[in-house]
Amino acid sequence: MSLDAIIESFVIDDFIVLLTPSSKIIAFSLYTNTSNISYLETFQHPLNSGHTSYKNSIYIFGGLSNKILNNELTTISTDTFHNASSKLLSNNQISPSLRSKSALFSVRNKLYLFAGQDHTGFLNDLWSFSPSLKIWSHIIYTNKGPSPRHSFAYASKGDIIIIWGGITESGYSNELFIYNIITNKWTEIYIASKQQPSKRYGACMIIDFPLIYIGGGANEFGICTDVWIYDLRKGQYIKTNYYVDRIYAYCFMDNGEIQYRSGEDPTLLVSNIFDKSLIGQLVSGVIIQKFSNGLFIAAGMKNSGTLNDDFIYYNIRIIVKGVVSDIPCNSMFAYHGSSFYYFSGSYYINKNKVFNFLPRAKFAKFNLGSMCENYNCTFECSPGFVLKEFKCVICPPGTYLYNNTCIPCNKGYFNPLQGASSIFQCYPCPEGSYNDKQGSSLCKICPIGYVCYAGSTAPELLKAKSEILMSEASSAKVEEYSREEEYFMGFIGFSISFILFIYYFRSDRFRKFIIKLDLFQSIHNHEIGKKIRLQKNLLGATFTVLFYISFACIGSNMIYYYFMQNQNKEYSLVPLVLLDNIFKDFQADFEVSVRIKKYADQCIISNKTGILETLVFTKCSDNILISIENLKRQKISNKCMLLDDNSCLVKISCEKCRIDKSSQMNFIFKGDFSYSSGFLVNFTSNSYITKSHQTSLSEIYPNKNNVFAGINPSVFTFLLTPSLCEVSKFFEITYLTGYQSQVYMLPIEGSERNVKDLFLPSELRLKIVLKKDDHGLLSKISIKEIFFSLLGGLFGSFNGLMTLFAFLIIMCEKISKRNVLNKSISQLQDVIKQRIHFISVFRDFIVDVSKEENMFPMSSVPSTEN
């Protein structure tokens, strides 16, 4: 029997068990000359794997399978040698390669490992680890990331990771990169200022938005002790008076001051950077975390070159000291939840034998919460976690951490992931979606026929651009004379109603009174054969009232049109020089209204009760700064209004203003949430051509899924043409001024940012440019008709109306008289008919009487004679 190479051997009971590379298990009896061979048909032994035995099992880890390196863990059970079996305990999992001088971050619910140096060279890969799933994932960027490097300064806050400097393949660096875990994009920050920190490695970093502190480190000239501030809003570096004289130091903010601990200083043999309460003189490679009221330091290397296995945790109430079971040194670490996770580090054989440049295969954690539970001490959770009974509970999606409480995101915002540590991780719903509920992790799709701008809480109906004009900012255009016609028709209607009232509700006393108003007493019809005399009646009085009302309407209209519309108008476009000669001190009033759509920051000052009133102009918030350039004015004022859709309306009123060749209005919004989903700018001034307020509207919106935010302003440009109106009335000349406006050019888009990239306090800017035209509009208005024309018209109208109403009275009386005559004739005919009837009746009665007289004798009739 030929044997393969033996890769593992151990003793089980009375047998020596051997494992060969061909997956054979051979058992030799220690007391008899017998042996057993069993084959593992389903198991293929990987090359160069690690193996060990425990009790009756063999454990095999890693190796090469089909020329691919894996990290599987397999066990082979040898309870019975004739029937050995294998079982896969852990599948092959991808994981980062061993490395040193990289960075480990805790962001939301994951850990992130970036770059470093391994046996192949410099790295720039990014990995994420899920503590809940215990799985590593390799992240592929959506754009180009930083070049491979190690020993860079790093920090994280919210949803971003920032790295600076380090050692690259081309040498030392002072580049600044920002990575957003939501968008999975790297952004290189290009520096506008000439003064900036030197290229270096081993620097430390502190994030205090919008400022980034960078200090310490070293370059080819030695240790760099200077500390710089980079302002993300201004894009500039500022050198400070702080100093950090260490490499790989741990820096933090304490009461507004920059402090540092640990770090390397090759020029010093003894370091005194720690308090006496700390254990030993720890120089470098420690795990350290600053809390709001305490500090934790563990492991690391002493300045003597030996490892330290002590830890210390202290706050304002307690000091806890102890020993760690494992000694991480120069490891990448991050505090997540209630545990310290550390990756790799310097390999060591014992406390005194450390290989600083050889990475250690180690990824582990130790729980601060469990320690404090044993020692009855208090501790803090990492950002995004809430402390509950010595356990850190992560905030769910749709919420953010505030004062140890998970607060729901506002309407119009969403948070897709767990572990948000600030309200900046609640992102506005992108364009085309909205959210009408608090605490949402997703946004709803905007319905068809509606529009949803970024940050919308409800869909809005599509409207024409002309409907967006704000009535609060300017008056609507009206048709000429429309209001006067309404007054005239109202007066006529009132007059008719008044007459009807008199007609239907007149009394005898009132009738006698109104008869006295009769002006047509001399033209009433008279009966033939009777004396002619002047008389007044009700018909004449009624027509007199109608005459007065009609003349009052027509006369007032004539008077109004004479004084208000009796104009001869001339319009001309003249050079501005000629216009200045006619009227030298040209000044006019105008208004500029700016609507900032979906403005997330404070727009107005709250009232005395602390409530923000909507749809009312009031004082603007202190974070809204307005400056004016090259604009001479007598008075200027600004007011703000909070609209129902969370938009902010800013109105600037300028009285007796003189536009220079190019005047400007600059708006700076400096709130923590100063971003907008669009701008609408409306310029309003008096116009003597359209007889109304003349308005010019211009609007601009960002690209999809973006909002306006940043230092570059959006620019609106209006061309203003001076408008001079010369009015000549009654030997007096009056000048009226205004500006005829128009949009000079399309608005220029300012800085934009993705709705998922609002990680720092924003700054919003807007510029309005008012350019004066080289020409001006000259309007001349003079009286068209003289005063005698008005008198003649009134006199003619009076006589004409009187003649008309006199004619109407005559016709009415003739019609009335004819009706009376016809009625008399009809009555006479009725009488005649009745009389004819009585004659016929009487005739019949006489005939009957004569017949009766023949029936009686004459003697029977008494005599009247003597």
Image (cartoon, rainbow, N blue to C red):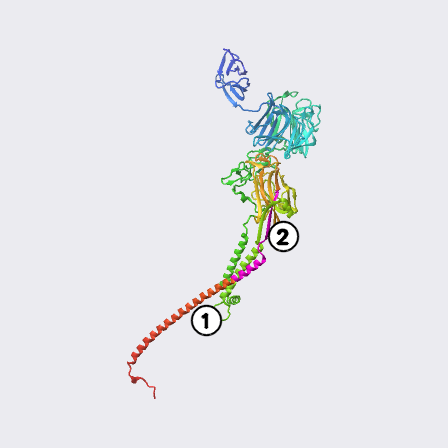
In this rendering, the count of numbered labels is 2
Q: Secondary structure at mark 2?
A: strand
Which of the two residues, 811 or 489, is positioned nearer the viewer here? 811
Expressed as whole percent of the image width and height from the top left, the position of residue 5 reads: 53, 13
Q: Is residue 577 above or below residue 418?
A: below
Q: Which residue is mark 1?
A: 528
Name the residue type under label 1: Ile
Expressed as whole percent of the image width and height from the top left, the position of residue 368 reads: 62, 30
Q: Secondary structure at mark 1?
A: loop
Which of the two residues, 647 or 30, is positioned nearer the viewer here? 647
Q: Which residue is mark 2?
A: 733
Q: Earlier in the sequence, mark 1 or mark 2?
A: 1
Query: Does the magenta segment cover residue 789?
Result: yes
- Position of the C terminus, as image quadrant, is bottom left
Expressed as whole percent of the image width and height from the top left, the position of residue 84 reads: 49, 18
Q: Is residue 563 above or below residue 157?
A: below
Q: What number is the disc on residue 87?
A: none
Q: Does residue 756 appear anywhere in the picture?
A: yes
Query: Does the magenta segment cover residue 264?
Result: no
Q: Does residue 340 appear anywhere in the picture?
A: no
Q: Is residue 351 above or below residue 714?
A: above
Which of the two residues, 18 or 795, is positioned nearer the viewer here? 795
Q: CA distance from mark 1 to mark 2?
A: 65 Å
Which of the two residues, 136 or 480, is positioned nearer the viewer here? 480
Which quadrant would residue 776 be assigned to in this image?
top right
Name the residue type under label 2: Ile
Give the crowd class for mark 1: few <14, some 14-19, many >=20 residues within 10 Å: few
Q: Which stretch appears magenta?
A: 772-800
Q: Are marks 1 and 2 in contact (CB under 8 Å)?
A: no
Give the crowd class for mark 2: few <14, some 14-19, many >=20 residues within 10 Å: few
